Image: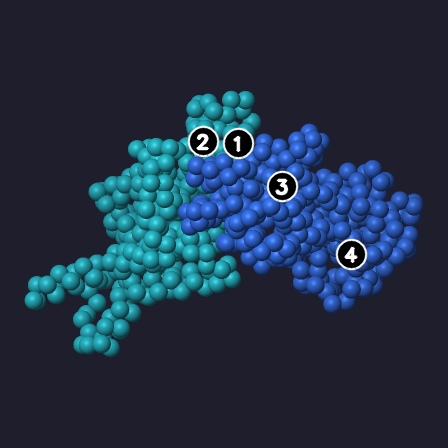
Chain colours: A cyan, B blue
Amino acid sequence: MNATMGRYRAVTGHRLFWPAAVLVVMLAANTIYRPGFLSIELKDGHLYGSPIDILRLSAPLILVALGMTLVISTGGIDLSVGSVCAISGAIACMYISKQSDQNSLVVVLTALAMALGVALVLGAWNGVLVAVIGIQPIIATLILMVAGRGLAQLITQGQIITINSEPFRAIGLGHLFTLPLAIFIALAAALLVAAFTRRTALGMIVESVGGNAEASRLAGIRSGRVIFLAYVLSAACAAIAGFMMTANVSSADGNAVGLWVELDAILAVVIGGTSLAGGRFFLSGTILGALIIQTLTTTVYAMDISPQTSLLFKAVVVIAVCLIQAPAFRARFARRRRSAPKPDTIADKPKEQVPA
Amino acid sequence: MRKMRTQSAPWRAAAVLASVLLVGGVAACGNSDTGGGGSKDDGKITMGFSQVGAESGWRTANTTSIKEAAAAAGVELKFDDAQQKQENQIKAIRNYIQQKVDVIAFSPVVESGWDTVLKEAKDADIPVILTDRSVDSADKSLYKTFLGSDFVKEGRLAGEWLVEQKKTASGPVNIVELQGNTGAAPANDRKKGFAEAIAANPNLKVIASQPGDFTRAGGKQVMEQFLKANPKIDVLFAHNDDMGLGALEAITAAGKVPGKDITIITVDAVKDGMQALADGKFNFIAECSPLLGPQLMDLAKKVHAGEQVAPRIETEETTFTQAQAKEALPNRKY
């Protein structure tokens, strides 16, 4: 009896349990509303169905959120990711549209390399502002968030650039083993980041810098360099996400690509249990968070919830997710029902310091 | 308050300065032709025009049309790009008042908050013409006229065409609608006009309607779910070409033929949309023309001469079928 209780508590106490439960509940609600929601069929050799759509559409958000997770775990924040998506997409599409043979693999690879290069420079710019000069992250990245949109517009000359390039299209819509290629790209990025942070000491160093940059520096960690790298990585992730977003519709729209994705990414990170104060991060939680956000959007369309109420609906679900996965809230709730078990995770242990 | 490391104040100041310069530099790119020269009374009309920005192909075509028409009509144009910001636009209008231009025209970024600056223009005796978008000022004497598209009419034209096409349909016709941004005037009005027109035939039913935010990505994502949730979709009505273009991809991916299995009606008639229409992927487009330059210059001359003009003037617009699109496409400017 006691053992079962213990196991039950171990499962429900796992920090991913509640976000996962919310995801399952949403999928179940969709299936009840429309029994065919989860069905997947084979069409033209590709898997086709709403769950596949959710995975494919959440791929860019997963990428952006991965970078955001690392930045946030250093105690910072990166508001410029949406603009970086737009700029990288604009550069890639602009370059491809100028070439005579848009289907050439060399052309597409050159375009991607150019755009990624610019994104790295932009990330370095953020990194220098925050780590070297010491501007508060929210202000430092706000600069690029605002100016970057203008830059993207400048590159596209205010027009929507339409391209006709199969290799580029594949980034957003291609398939591998009957599944969308975008899923594999996001997965590969996630595994790469996980391997570097969790299989080496890098993750611990990042968390240590996020916990207290000055103490880490005194302990021999080059805090500035770690913070700088986090912003560069975030920009690189955003650039790849930008490729996916533009490839998805084969066109670059300086205004619309990646609009508000920074907010979705921060939300995904928070849902995943990473502390906004820095010092702790959970990559798997972030991925789950991104999936929840995309499922929520898809649910609104699939159930045809009226546009006037859909924002409220989303807000209610998000608040519910955040509350339900906060150990403090659950503990208070549980205490009311019976004598409270102590919250058994320290994920959200309050920190006195809040990054200004 | 945590510091990454101790840093000297001059460094920080330099960085902030550099950042401000960068932002300013980008913002300044659109600002041209505002400075210099007051109006001389040489009989030539001087017009100050403040544009919303350059957010779309439609808007750029609008700007080009105004610039070309001004040159053709011999109107001296002072042009300002407000970069989607009301304060820029107010600044530009005050600038024009100071320069004593003969006519001020502008496309308001937002609907409200114009009373003060419009009153200043009125006090300075400079007539104001609104283009493309209106303001919500209660005092209609603050501007001479509003020249722009009738969004309700665009929706109605789209609906009327559909009613005509489906006259003989015996069973129900399922329509899905891709709206613009929730609450935006073009979205509300096109939805309204379309709904009014299709009420003529009870067989025509809008079974799903969601905002695709006027973007291709939005239109595509919404259409993907529409297709999965509704096994039988006969007609798609998209509030602009871009959402329709995004939806095309979703329809093709679902194994259906756009333009045949699903009739597609859109609004705008930008180049990519017209191409899709000529290729047979769209079925009908109600035009929302940005080419209001010549009409604007005519109006400017009239109000400058002190003639009375109607308070609401519609842009000259038409509709396109597939055959008409093929014909018109080579001459399209945008």
Identify which residue, A39 or A157, lies in the foreground.
A39
Q: CA distance from mark 2 to mark 3?
A: 30 Å
- For the residue marked with disc 3, what is the amino acid? Phe
Q: Nearer the viewer, mark 1 or mark 4?
A: 4
Q: Quadrant of the C terminus of chain A?
A: bottom left
The residue lying at 85 percent from left, 60 percent from top is: B125
Residue at image location 19% in from the left, 74% down from the top: A340
Percent from the top left, x then y, of residue A286? 32, 51
Relative to A335, is B123 above or below? Answer: above
In the image, which disc is placed on residue B284? Answer: 3
Instruction: Please name the residue that numbered disc 2 is placed on.
Output: A168
Residue B312 disc label: 4
Q: Is residue A8 above or below residue B181?
A: below
Q: CA distance from mark 1 to mark 4?
A: 40 Å
Q: Closest to the observer: B238 or A338?
A: B238
Where in the figure is residue B292, as x and y percent of width and height? 75, 45
- First in sequence: mark 1 vs mark 2: 1
Q: Are marks 1 and 2 in contact (CB under 8 Å)?
A: yes
Location of residue A234 in the rendering, given as x and y in whole percent from the top left corner? 39, 44
Tell me the quarter of the image containing the N terminus of chain A. bottom left
Q: Secondary structure at mark 4?
A: strand
The chain to which mark 3 is attached is B
Whether residue A82 can be seen here: no
Mark 2 neighbour class, 10 Å CA radius: few under 14, some 14 to 19, many 20 or more: many
